[in-house]
Image (cartoon, helix red, strand yellow):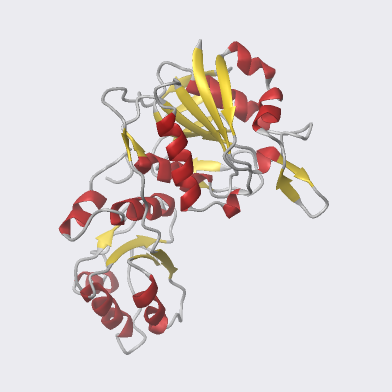
């Protein structure tokens, strides 16, 4: 029987209504007691570094979770992280870069309704998460939710209330859970030694383009962002409202040694800057990166990871190097 460490961080799964709305209140041991059958699958120890609504989680919390996994890596066969759904995809992506090449599973799960309620998805999600984590075929960072096993770099929350909260974007599910067992679509690698990272550069800004946005937003960006992710329209482009100002400001921003990544607001099929003139003009402004089919969550986390240690051309090389099937 395998030994699993449960890292409880809060979220809806651990929430009670305190009169002012749902807020995390259940402890890790209380959560575990909701699903006693887990004891038939694996041995579990629990830690609770914090108990927060995931809206309140920051990159510092991602680093704390990664630190707990690293400190306990040799003691346990896998790790289950209970987490709020709102930023779970960001945490899953971040852990994919902070804990690379893990032959042991790191599984994130949560629920759309509190485990405190009678009618909840929490118990099934917890049972599935531990069953997957204890399986011999499991490895790497995944979200297990509503019977789906989704790679950490490909997950996105696409429903706010329904039990099928998460979708694997432009990539198949790794597996599905049926009657407490995973059925694999994509076998997971188990070789090699894990590599842990301990820093993130949080000076990353996401600029979502909207019609009529003014280019003087760069006045702020030039002094507050080392890395800029621009969520552009469609396949990718910048608007020209008759003055070409966005292209001038982008060129100046790049000349300052800043890193710019273009992605798209469209959920699926990714960006392609070379398709339209409004995209090709971007390529003439200097060296920009393109997220292609990466999720926004993975793009943010990867850029924070890269900028914490890399400079110059190394940034581009690392960004386009696939990690956990994040880009292709």
Q: Quadrant of residue 26?
A: top right
Quadrant housing the C terminus: top left
Q: Residue furthest bottom?
A: 243
Q: Residue furthest right?
A: 19
Q: In the rendering, at what x and y percent does residue 289 appear?
A: 25, 60
Given residues 18 and 151, the one toward you in this image is: 18
Q: In the rendering, at what x and y percent does residue 41 appear?
A: 57, 13
- The residue located at (44%, 21%) in the rendering is 75
Question: On screen, 210 above or below 46?
Answer: below
Q: In the rendering, at what x and y percent does residue 50 appear?
A: 60, 43
Can residue 169 be seen in the rendering of this structure? Answer: no
In the displayed structure, does residue 266 sit left or right of residue 245?
Answer: right
In the displayed structure, does residue 297 sit left or right of residue 25?
Answer: left
Q: Residue furthest front?
A: 71
Question: On screen, 294 above or below 229?
Answer: above
Number of numbered discs overlaid on the protein picture: 0
Given residues 242 and 69, the one toward you in this image is: 69
- The residue located at (18%, 54%) in the rendering is 314
Q: In the rendering, at what x and y percent does residue 11 appear?
A: 63, 43
- The residue located at (55%, 51%) in the rendering is 57
Q: Quadrant of residue 98?
A: top left
Given residues 196 and 327, the one toward you in this image is: 196
Given residues 181 and 130, the one toward you in this image is: 130
In the displayed structure, does residue 66 sit left or right of residue 147?
Answer: left
């Amino acid at each position: 029987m395998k030994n699993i460490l449960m890292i409880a961080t809060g979220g809806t799964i651990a929430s009670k209504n305190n009169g002012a709305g749902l807020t995390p209140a259940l402890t890790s041991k209380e959560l575990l007691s909701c699903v006693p059958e887990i004891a038939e699958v694996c041995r579990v120890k629990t830690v609770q570094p914090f108990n927060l609504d995931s809206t309140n989680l920051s990159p510092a919390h991602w680093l704390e979770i990664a630190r707990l996994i690293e400190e306990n890596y040799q003691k346990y066969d896998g790790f289950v992280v209970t987490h709020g759904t709102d930023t779970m995809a960001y945490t899953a992506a971040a852990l994919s870069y902070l804990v690379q090449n893990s032959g042991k599973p790191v599984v994130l799960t949560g629920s759309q309704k509190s485990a405190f309620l009678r009618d909840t998805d929490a118990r099934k999600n917890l049972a599935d998460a531990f069953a997957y984590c204890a399986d011999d075929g499991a490895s790497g960072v995944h979200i297990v939710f509503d019977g789906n096993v989704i790679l950490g770099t490909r997950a996105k929350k696409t429903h706010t209330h329904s039990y099928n909260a998460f979708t694997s974007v432009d990539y198949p599910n790794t597996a599905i859970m049926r009657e407490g067992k995973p059925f694999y679509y994509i076998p997971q690698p188990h070789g090699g030694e894990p590599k842990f990272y301990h820093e993130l550069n949080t000076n990353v800004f996401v600029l979502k383009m909207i019609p009529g946005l003014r280019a003087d937003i760069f006045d702020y960006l030039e002094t507050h962002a080392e890395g800029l992710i621009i969520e552009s329209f469609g396949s990718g482009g910048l608007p020209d409202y008759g003055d070409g100002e966005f292209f001038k400001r982008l060129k100046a921003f790049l000349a300052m040694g800043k890193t710019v990544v273009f992605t798209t607001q469209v959920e699926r099929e990714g960006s392609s800057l070379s398709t339209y003139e409004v995209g090709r003009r971007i390529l003439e402004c200097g060296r920009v990166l393109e997220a292609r089919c990466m999720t926004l969550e993975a793009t943010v986390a990867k850029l924070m990871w890269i900028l914490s240690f890399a400079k110059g051309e190394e940034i581009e090389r690392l960004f386009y190097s696939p990690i956990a099937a994040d880009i292709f």
